[in-house]
Image (tube, coloured by chain):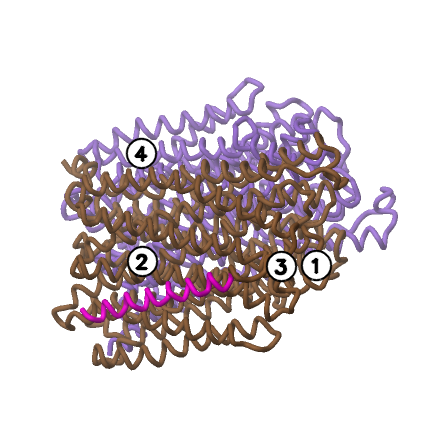
Chain colours: A purple, B brown
Amino acid sequence: MNLLYFSMISGFLALIVVIFLVKGILKKDTGNEKMIEISGYIEEGAMAFLKKEYSYLVVFIIVIALAIIMFLNFKTAVAFVVGALFSIVAGYIGMRIAVKSNVRTTEAAKHGIREALAVAFSGGTVMGLCVVGLGIIGLGFFSIIFDLNAEYITGFGLGASSIALFARVGGGIYTKAADVGADLVGKVEAGIPEDDPRNPAVIADNVGDNVGDVAGMGADLFESYVGSIISAITLGSVLVGEWGINIVIFPLVLSSIGILASLIGIIFVKAYKGDNPQKALNLGSTISGVIVLVVGFIVCNMLMGSYELFLPVIAGLIVGLIIGKVTEYYTSADYKPVKFIANESKTGPATNIIAGLSVGMKSTVIPILLIVIGIIISFFAIGGGSNTSLGLYGIALSAVGMLSTTAITIAVDAYGPISDNAGGIAEMCELDKNIREITDKLDSVGNTTAAIGKGFAIGSAALTALALFASYSQTVNLQTINLLDPLTLVGVLIGGMLPFLFAALTMQSVGKAATEMVEEVRRQFREKEGILKGTEKPDYSKCVEISTHAALKEMILPGILAIAVPLIVGMLLGTEALGGLIGGGVVTGVMLAIMMSNSGGAWDNAKKYIETGINGGKGSVAHKAGVVGDTVGDPFKDTSGPSMNILIKLMTIVSVVFAPVIAKYGGVLIQYLIK
Amino acid sequence: MNLLYFSMISGFLALIVVIFLVKGILKKDTGNEKMIEISGYIEEGAMAFLKKEYSYLVVFIIVIALAIIMFLNFKTAVAFVVGALFSIVAGYIGMRIAVKSNVRTTEAAKHGIREALAVAFSGGTVMGLCVVGLGIIGLGFFSIIFDLNAEYITGFGLGASSIALFARVGGGIYTKAADVGADLVGKVEAGIPEDDPRNPAVIADNVGDNVGDVAGMGADLFESYVGSIISAITLGSVLVGEWGINIVIFPLVLSSIGILASLIGIIFVKAYKGDNPQKALNLGSTISGVIVLVVGFIVCNMLMGSYELFLPVIAGLIVGLIIGKVTEYYTSADYKPVKFIANESKTGPATNIIAGLSVGMKSTVIPILLIVIGIIISFFAIGGGSNTSLGLYGIALSAVGMLSTTAITIAVDAYGPISDNAGGIAEMCELDKNIREITDKLDSVGNTTAAIGKGFAIGSAALTALALFASYSQTVNLQTINLLDPLTLVGVLIGGMLPFLFAALTMQSVGKAATEMVEEVRRQFREKEGILKGTEKPDYSKCVEISTHAALKEMILPGILAIAVPLIVGMLLGTEALGGLIGGGVVTGVMLAIMMSNSGGAWDNAKKYIETGINGGKGSVAHKAGVVGDTVGDPFKDTSGPSMNILIKLMTIVSVVFAPVIAKYGGVLIQYLIK
């Protein structure tokens, strides 16, 4: 049990580093008055959104907590509330620092790319360390006070999941409503460039980057991180008799090693002296991964006396890495798929769309095969062929392994939107061109790391959901979920349909919100003629308000669906049907997540590729088609696609938490039908 | 067993009616010389495609037949070959008559809408009766000579499925390559109207309607029809001890009743004296349905002494009907979804695409819930709660019930493309305007019936595949396919991915072929300046050749995938993984089928709706956006979407047929891993 304290210490260590990082960032120069003003708007907008969002979430947390107390027990409810609060705190700190880092990155860029990278990366690191620090502290704490009883600890995961849902969906709608709205009127109708301060939606757009790509992504990975560890604890707890208590503690220890490894990786990034940000980030990630492999292996042998137990960890780490690389292949202009889309754009938007969709669909193949290989290795390498429980534990362990270096992964990922914002501020403040060039370089590296991060988030979500699925069956004591049972089939069909419904709802939400934004921007241009001339200031706050309002309103229905449908199916049709629902949901959810993210990313880069002069360059037929694809891709890659990750994890963890109730009272319709 | 002869007789009766219908059609006037010439081109093109396709299929049939002989037995191989040949013959006759009916419909339109309807409907009826006639004769014959041994009879289903795959995929690629190619250059670039004889791709486009919508659709439903009956026979055969042999014969008897009911319905359509084709078709379909319900109920009681056994049949019929109506709701301009897309078109193609995709995704919800309700009723009403085998038989029976009136369903459906062709001929021969008006009216009714037919095809494919899935488990003697087993999960993931890959491949095929077509049409316009002036004849045959060649070349890879992947997974990972693969494939396949078909239909009608003057009418921003959506929707609704039906059925029946081999030798990789 001392090891639990060790893991908590690593969490506190991460938070201490956060304090130093924050102090360092705040010490940096914030530039001239204009920069302070503009970045002030962004910070204000971002914080306003978070505060509003939290006021909704508080209601939600109270309702669910009461439901848990009523139907389950008080301990789970406490863990739930703390899980939700920790996710909120991590998001709050991460975003608060992100919106302070952006302008400081712009200012640092005056001294060169290395200095700018240092600030932006520090900002991202804060988010990354908060996620893992709070995650492991919470898990360690509840493991100690609940004596490693997984039944209560899952509440922590449910809290994390719930917040992730709203953060991802709300944030995704926010960012794309602003982005699409700003582009449609600004770039297309008024003909002003991106990030032009005359565009009333420009601040909302920049706020959106933080809300969606920093806070949303952080909450997503917080959920995966916590969920994978919880599933490993749950699945490990049946093996305690055979293996000793260490099998339950090992996942936590492994995660602690991951935190320390990430910290070392982060030091390497910050100590990097060259001019190539991509190299610096790769170096840090690689070092972290290698440390986890080496130290993890040694500790695994010491703790468990078995090197086989470490094979799933290796599999998880490698599969996560390759999925990221595959994502890059499908979404980077350096490779065939994006070039194919750019070529198909020559015959107009229709062929561009068909090409983008088919690229996204095709891009599901390799990640799925990788996940499949990961599952097989994790299950069988550890001896699942003769001991199923052990094999399932292996799958959970591979998820934990994949996510062990989450801290640096988030740092690398969140540095992107900070650089993006920094560029926006440079543009809006009309700073020197070479500053924009530096931020553009950082931003373009950020696009690659974001693509890799997205693939990683999907892969980890899939593995986490599958591991939680196994936990579910253990909690309701199901030995089999029989696909031949029509109720399971029914569950699979309903579960398979949910991600489609979810994608439809979130896409329509973006559409509706963007239309509102378009109308507001048009109105401002119409009523205040000075805006476009640059003599009058646009009303930024109105656009921020629209995005905020739309995001919060539109996140409710999908949110309720994700939580209510599993419970309804479980209560009406029983535990096997609910198991089927999870299975079906995970399958189509993962497919849509990969397809939508990659289609979106590929469209985006195809447009950018055409803008470099390919197939006629800017203004050509191909370019116009590319813009259409990019616009369709926006909600694909930043709203609906990433929401799938949360949907599948949330559906699963809701089922795990409420499993005891469903096992006891579920299946009322079926009992009636059988009579 | 005498009842088997009765069912065969109903099949022969259907074929006899075909002979009379054909004679009647051929006696009709073919119009003036120009009409004969133009329709001659279409007929020539269609027959050329079929012949080329068959030359490929012969090779395929021989290879598979040899494989069956080698790994299974001779009897299954015979049934396979006959199943394939019967599907080919049904397609051949149906299409041959369809391309003879089109010009005669045009000519008949000179005498009024009633006369035109009579000819077009007769043409469609030939296809419908050939499908059910040959289907039931084949099944009856093999049931008799193989003594109702399902193991061999499934070969007949595999034959039907294989041909369906190539007919649907090949036909789908053919028709959309021609359509998209003709539109992109003709309508968009050269500004000539649809069906203009100056467009070199116009004949290929008209041929495509027959190849895709008549032959492809016929083969699809032939497969469902045969497959559902086979699954009922397979699942019934384990109940013989309890219920007597009639439980195996009942599905065939029910189908015979359906044929007779369809014949009566067809008589009502032909005897209809009013001017509203929609009413005539509805009348016929309703009468057929009611007859099946009444007579079927009586026969069920007589034969089985149980009215519960009839409940699944009722459920199947009603679910099929409602799914059709729901499809109409999502794809007709009379309702909200299409209007929503038309409105979103005002802000350009991107919002049109997002709206169309979200409508398609949302449209999965109700059909899935209907299928789910159908499954629950069919399973539990019949007593599946206490007797699983009986419940599974109920699911198969509901598929048989849904498909019992296939004859008139196909007739109503195939009349559409014939009318469409008739309109095209009227246009190309520059006939009187009121003739085109009549064919347009028939065509527009045809669009509705086609939408309903598509929904029906998907619903029946889903139920058939699920029933076959149950047969599979019985054949390999699996009591459970455990979703908690990682191998099953692996199968589910791979199966779930296949439809995405399949959709990507077929969409890319259409894109490639359409690009070739565009280049050819452009070339002809460039090299022969007289074409656009109307002084020179375009080279139709070159375009026909391109479509033919592309369709055949591009159908090979998806075809092989659909057959090979299940076998590979079964051999490597064993029967449970293969079961998972089927389950996963059915789920995502059904979702994509519904989504793609409905998105495509909705885009099509949104464009037409805008063309009536809404949101600016022709030439407006909204209209241009509508055209983009329509073009994206073309491969959605006519190639990739319908291909899903076949994919899921084929994967399943391949597994059923090769189940004995897989049960014996499968799972080699896993055996190795466990060691």
Residue position marked by numbered label 4 in the rendering = A315
Residue A227, position in %: x, y?
37, 49
- Residue B240 appears left or right of A531: left
Judge whether A534 appears above or below B265 on screen: above
Question: Which chain letter matches label 1?
Answer: B
Question: Which chain letter matches label 3?
Answer: B
| Magenta: main secondary structure | helix
Asked if labels 1 and 3 share a chain, the reply is: yes
Q: Does the magenta stretch include residue B10?
A: yes
- The numbered mark at residue B605 is 3
- The numbered mark at residue B610 is 1
Q: Tell us which disc is closer to us: 3 or 2.
A: 2
Query: Which segment is the magenta one?
Result: B1-25
Under circle 3, the secondary element is helix
The quadrant of the image that shows the N terminus of chain A is top left
State which tag comes first along the sequence, 1 or 3. 3
